[in-house]
Image (cartoon, grey):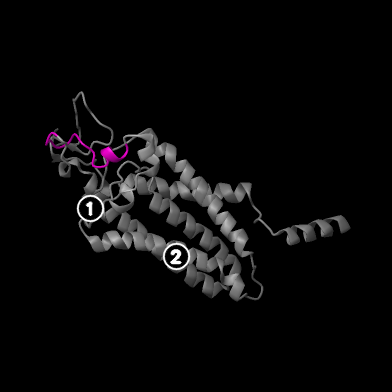
Amino acid sequence: YGGGSNITIATPGLRSNLSALHGELFNLKDFSQDYFVDFSGSEFVQGLNEAVAGVSLALTVAIFLIPLLVSFRGQARPHVVSMLHRWQRTLFTVSILRVPTYLATSIPGAAEHCQSVHWTSPRGGHGEWEVNQRHAETVKDMFFDTYNFFNNSNCGDLIYSGHIATVLTSTLIATHYARRMLGARWAWGVCALIWLIFSLQVFCVLTTRNHYTVDVVVACYTAPLNYIANVYFFPKDVAPKEEERGELERDSAC
């Protein structure tokens, strides 16, 4: 293990997602880890990271509920279920696209809890044991073990960031409908708020060291491309049966 940027590891028992070598910290060379403040040990910022994601989702749903309460003259009034349908479809595809990227190549975990200098194997050694290894030894464990629900031990799903992809997708969908439903001033204010929340999410993800910068960068172009593809292939929102029937009647009358 050299001090430069070139690293050579020779070991017959190299495990996937190895994040330490002989008990030493082992991270990839990364822009945000070199130049951003380190809040990996801050419980407040760790909690804020999760809270911001929750606020983003809640705000998106709140925007979808606007047509139930108020409408703006000259603005569209989409169906709540139609907006929810497009949002969930877009989130589904961006989540599916994420799976092969982090399974194809497992890189050393960026988070502090992924550093195996903190782990001790049954033989008392460092750097050769993953903290959640004993909880994923069988197929049953993979589906039913609840250890990771209560212990932050997730380390392998890095490229790309699920938090960023989800929040950015929600931000794009919320912006799309806010501009259609709201007046210019209201739309500008709502869009400014949701994009500020997204920026805060990026800050929290990077400063808590939960991801490398590349995880965020890939999410920041994958999520918009996925959103654009969904709009291209499904340009019209799903409409209730009554509305579809009305359109068919108007078409036949013409």
Q: Label 1 sits on what residue type?
A: Tyr
The numbered dot on residue 132 is: none
**Residue occupied by mark 2:** 194
Query: Up-down: is 40 above or below 72?
Result: above
Give the x, y percent position of residue 36: 24, 55
Judged by its main secondary structure, the magenta piece is loop
Badge 2 vs badge 1, beta-carbon distance below 8 Å: no
**Mark 2: few, some, or many residues within 10 Å (few <14, many ≥20)?**
many
Q: Quadrant of residue 114?
A: top left
Instruction: Name the residue rendered at 28%, 47% in the picture.
Output: 153
Percent x, y of residue 31: 26, 48
Kindly state the secondary structure of the residue where label 2 is placed: helix
Quarter of the image containing the N terminus? top left
Q: Earlier in the sequence, mark 2 or mark 1?
A: 1
Looking at the image, which residue is at 31% across and 58% down?
204
Residue 125 magenta-drawn? Answer: yes
- Is residue 200 in sight in this rendering? no
Residue sitting nearer the eye, 183 or 39: 39
Q: Which residue is mark 1?
A: 35
- Helix, strand or loop at mark 1: helix
Residue 186 belongs to the span the image colors magenta: no
Q: Residues within 10 Å of mark 1 (few under 14, many from 20)?
A: few
Horizontal side of 187 relative to 151 (left or right) equals right
Percent from the top left, x then y, of residue 186?
A: 52, 74
Residue 173 in sight from this viewpoint: yes
